Amino acid sequence: MIVTEFPHYLNTANELRKHLIPRLETALGKFSKRNSAEVIQPVRTTVPLQKHSGFLGVMPCYMENDGILCTKLVSFYKRPAGSTLPSTQATVMLLDPEYGNVKVMDGEVITFMRTAAVSAISAKLLMRPDAEVLTILGTGKQAKSHYNVFTEIFQFKEVRVWSRSVDRADTFAGSLNGPVTVCKSVEEAVKGADIIVTVTRSTEPVLFGQWVKPGAHVTAVGACRPDWRELDDTLMKQAVVYVDSRESAMTESGDIILSGVEIFAEIGDVINGTKPACREKTTVFKSLGLGVEDAASAQLVYDKWKQC
Ligand SMILES: NC(=O)C1=CN([C@@H]2O[C@H](COP(=O)(O)OP(=O)(O)OC[C@H]3O[C@@H](n4cnc5c(N)ncnc54)[C@H](O)[C@@H]3O)[C@@H](O)[C@H]2O)C=CC1
Ligand SMILES: O=C(O)C1=NCCCC1
């Protein structure tokens, strides 16, 4: 059987709350237990495509007790400013662990949705409960999925967005099904914000600690190479730092490696109740993207498709 389309009904608040988010929480909790009967998921293998300023990532995952075998191929590129080419393209393959046959799926929507849903999990656990202002830095594909998921799941008084180009930010604002304030600078966008999502392709810091309100939560989604940054050292050092995977963070995250900060916990540890959620402090969740997230999401898509 081959599923080639991601069912878009998973985008609704009800489906996110009832299905995608709980499955991702369960998967991240299992991952953090490091029990190989639950999850085998090595750090992504990344092949540099030097000539094209890109990378090919291979992301396998086996969840024996759940009978889920999955791998993703993802290519991602540093595109020049103004390029209309996609920066990230993915194919997720769900396999039958007994027979080894492949049930191919489109991976792009899974990547958009699961990444935003994992960010929403970090916000649920680490953002202050009275959070009113959300800021999104970047106006690409992930910015859109984060806007959609965050405004479905939470209620903010204001959502702000920043892009290097005000025209792109205006176009982005016009493409949304809800209100957003377009800001001209990062400083203006993040001043007083309770939660900040960084979803840029930047390789240098764009978010500086001096602008971030004490107690704010930052979900950092871009900068997935050891020499790429989105956050500066000041922010990294003033925050309690959470990650999706310690091994991934120590291999792939410039924000972690180059700032030299200590990782406080995996988000799965907080889900498991083995590490606290320091909501009253400034927190950073560094997301690298894990095969286990794709595996849990792909299985959900497959289960839903079988029910149709
Ligand atoms: N952690 C995870 O699980 C995942 C992370 N990613 C990463 O998230 C980031 C965003 O991905 P997409 O939305 O798919 O990319 P995209 O190409 O659709 O959007 C990127 C955005 O970053 C902006 N940008 C590019 N260079 C910049 C710079 N130097 N400074 C500030 N802004 C800049 C672009 O104008 C655009 O708004 C990428 O870094 C990607 O690698 C993507 C998928 C999963
Ligand atoms: O997990 C993913 O999918 C990605 N992570 C970082 C780079 C692009 C895709």
Image (spheres, helix red, strand yellow):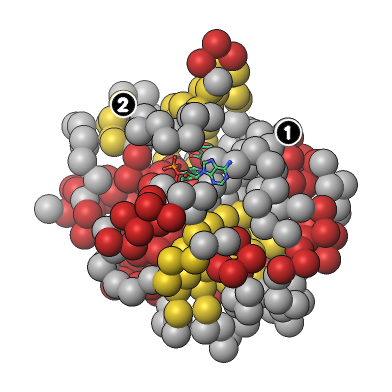
Name which residue lies at 43% across and 55% down.
Answer: 166
Above-or-below relation of 81 to 218 = above
Q: In this orientation, which residue lies closer to the viewer: 241 or 178? A: 178
Check mark 1 vs ligand 1: CB closer than 8 Å? yes or no: no
Quadrant hosting residue 111? top left
Q: Considering the numbered disc 1 on the image, is that residue within a helix, a strand or a loop? A: loop
Tell me whether the residue at label 1 lies in contact with that at label 2, contact meaning CB atoms closer than 8 angstroms. Answer: no
Q: Is residue 133 left or right of residue 242?
A: left
Quadrant hosting residue 272? bottom right
Measuring from the top left, give residue 29's x and y in whole percent.
59, 59
Residue on which disc 1 sits:
227
Name which residue lies at 56% across and 68% down.
Answer: 189
Measuring from the top left, give residue 182's x and y in whole percent.
43, 66
The amino acid type of the residue labelled 2 equals Val
Residue 135 visible in the current orientation: yes
Structural crowding at the residue carrying mark 2, measured as other residues with C-alpha within 10 Å and reported as few (<14), some (14–19) or many (≥20): some
Residue on which disc 2 sits:
102
Quote the CA–CA distance across marks 1 and 2.
Answer: 35 Å
Q: Is residue 155 left or right of residue 264?
A: left
Quadrant hosting residue 83? top left
Name which residue lies at 57% across and 45% down.
Answer: 222
Measuring from the top left, give residue 59's x and y in whole percent.
52, 31
**In this figure, what is the number of numbered marks?**
2
Q: Considering the numbered disc 2 on the image, is that residue within a helix, a strand or a loop? A: strand
Whichever of callouts 1 and 2 sits on the residue coming sooner in the sequence is 2
Above-or-below relation of 43 to 33 = above
The amino acid type of the residue labelled 1 equals Asp
Q: Nearer the viewer, mark 1 or mark 2?
A: 1
Measuring from the top left, give residue 256's x and y in whole percent.
77, 47
Name which residue lies at 27% across and 61% down.
Answer: 174
